[in-house]
Amino acid sequence: MAFTPVKDKYRSKVGEVTLGATREQGGTRAYTITVGGEATLPFLHFEGEIPNRPVVALEVWDVAPADWNPCFEPFYGDVYNNPAAWAKKCVEEFGADLVVLRLRGADPDVKDASPEDCAKVVKDVLAAVGCPLVVLGCGKAEKDNQIMPAVAEAAAGENLLLGVAEQENYKSLTAACMVHKHNIIAQSPIDINICKQLNILITEMNLPPNRIVIDPTIAALGYGLEYGYSIMERARNGALGGDSMLAMPMIGNVGYEVWRVKEANASAAEYPGWGEQEARGILWEATTAMALLQAGMDIVVMRHPKAAGLIKQNIDELMVKTSYEG
């Protein structure tokens, strides 16, 4: 017998943001990626349109990461000191849709790389891969305010996604995105009110909503995942209910959060009942990402290639429209 699902009706939808620019658009990318646009809750195809699938990004650093688990060595060890080669490997070998370049070397406590050095790294990575590029600063506001305008200028026309803008430090990056025509990541500390207020502040500087991606801040499985999920869920419901200042696609740094917790890194010798470390870490990362996809995440930033592969497979399965005719 036929089954007819109960359908909710929504007033609005999530806005779309396009990343990257092809040669015809003034950039050098081989293709662009559009995220957002959902007119329903995640993967409920019977209820509304989901025009753009979530995408999977892999993380690249401009310096060799000193604190990454040794299990990453077989995958990235040969390219740790070459971010361009690292990015190319992520795309060509591991199938990343996007590359997220973290300028960790700009941190005064790491390498204190200059704005010119950072801009060169970005240009090298752009030359190595054809995918759209996300660029994150070092995480120190004072230094990021120096390097990110230089990065934005060096990559003018490429339509990058730059981050992060925060409530107390958003003006410099917003201005750089406006002048050089890039998109911005608006990051809030797991707080829906700050999330909305930051989007208002950025748009008041005349950067349009279709160039903003929300980073609501997430947590790993077992470390507050439920709270992060609830914030994303509220943002998605707000967007579908017509709140234009919450109607932006969302990004989450899953790999970064997962691979700094004990459960992903502790050895089997330390905790024999937990199983082998690498397999456990991969599943910890994939499980975290799978949950956040169900909350509405559009760009999932992963670290382990095998976890990224699991998530790409999961997205493929979730994007299949299911018939309810029995």
Image (cartoon, rainbow, N blue to C red):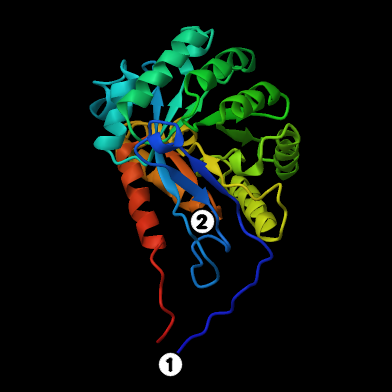
Q: Which residue is mark 2?
A: 294
Residue 284 sits in which quadrant? top left
In the image, residue 53 sits, relative to residue 156, either above or below, namely below
Residue 194 sits in which quadrant? top right
Residue 163 on image: x %, y %: 56, 28
In the image, residue 103 sits, relative to residue 94, either above or below, namely above
Residue in view at x 51 percent, y 26 percent? 136
Q: Is residue 282 left or right of residue 101?
A: left
Q: Considering only order in the chain, which callout, 2 or 1, is on the residue closer to the N terminus?
A: 1
Q: Is residue 27 left or right of residue 180?
A: left
Residue 205 on image: x %, y %: 73, 31
Q: How many marks?
A: 2
10 Å crowding of disc 2: few (<14), some (14-19), many (20+): some
Secondary structure beneath label 2? helix
Residue 284: assigned label? none
User: Is any part of residue 273 visible from this angle?
Assistant: no
Q: Locate the C terminus and report the quarter of the image it occupies.
A: bottom left
Secondary structure beneath label 1? loop
Q: Which residue is mark 1?
A: 1
Q: Locate the N terminus and report the quarter of the image it occupies.
A: bottom left
Three-letter amino acid code at the position of disc 1: Met
Q: As rendered, which of 31 and 202 lies closer to the eye?
A: 31
